[in-house]
Amino acid sequence: MAVPRVELTDPATELLRALEAQHGPVMFHQSGGCCDGSAPMCYPRNEFRVGSADVLLGRVAGDTPFWMSADQFEYWKHTHLTVDVVPGRGSGFSLEAPEGVRFLIRSRLLTDDEVLALAAEPPPATGAEYEG
């Protein structure tokens, strides 16, 4: 993918590496909703079932998949996401919760050039097409 839809800050990458050392391969899922439902959730890769309509935004920090629910993608498809980490407790289901920090999304609109470049690429893969 020439234009990344999602990236991590350096602190988020460091936390992700620590979580991988503790839990093995992980993944992110961004659902819609309120409260912690709108935060990026980090799970062991094989313990979260991706829905057939979920959209693979890309891979961060090398090979870590970042998924988004289809409804959320429709709303944010013109947005670039940056995953950061901040102090505070997030959801009890996301792997970073016991660390006293939480992942957080920062966003910006895609530039006109990024929108044009993405339009020339195939659409993102969905959970229906995903092979791991």
Image (cartoon, rainbow, N blue to C red):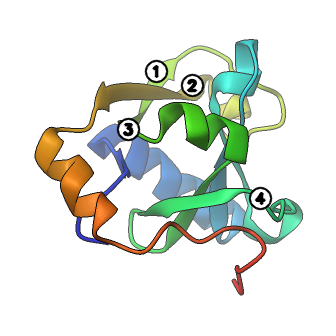
- Picture coordinates of residue 43 (x, y %)? 74, 53
- Which residue in the protein does label 4 denote? 53
- From the image, tell me which residue sits under label 2: 101
Q: Can residue 69 be seen in this view?
A: no
Q: What SS does tag 1 mark?
A: strand
Q: Name the residue under label 1.
A: 86
In this rendering, position of residue 18 left or right of residue 49 = left
Mark 2 against mark 4, which lies toward the viewer?
Answer: 4
**Where does the image place residue 74, in percent across and percent down from the top left?**
58, 39
Residue type highlighted by circle 3:
His
Foreground: disc 1 or disc 4 = 4
Question: Percent position (x, y) of residue 68?
Answer: 64, 48
Closer to us: 32 or 17? 32
Find residue 109 and report its horizontal and vertical position in percent: 28, 29
- Name the image quarter holding the C terminus: bottom right
CB contact under 8 Å: marks 3 and 1: no
Q: Give the mark, 3 or 2, whose residue is nearer the N terminus.
A: 3
Q: Which of marks 2 and 1 is nearer the N terminus?
A: 1
* Spatial separation of the CA atoms under disc 2 and disc 4: 30 Å
For the point 25% across and 38% down, the residue is 110
Identify residue type, mark 4.
Answer: Ala
In the rendered view, tell whether residue 14 sits above or below residue 132. above
- Which residue occupies the foreground of this view, 63 or 38? 38
The answer to the question of whether label 3 and label 4 lie on touching residues, with beta carbons closer than 8 A, is: no
Instruction: Name the residue rendered at 23%, 69% in the picture.
Output: 2
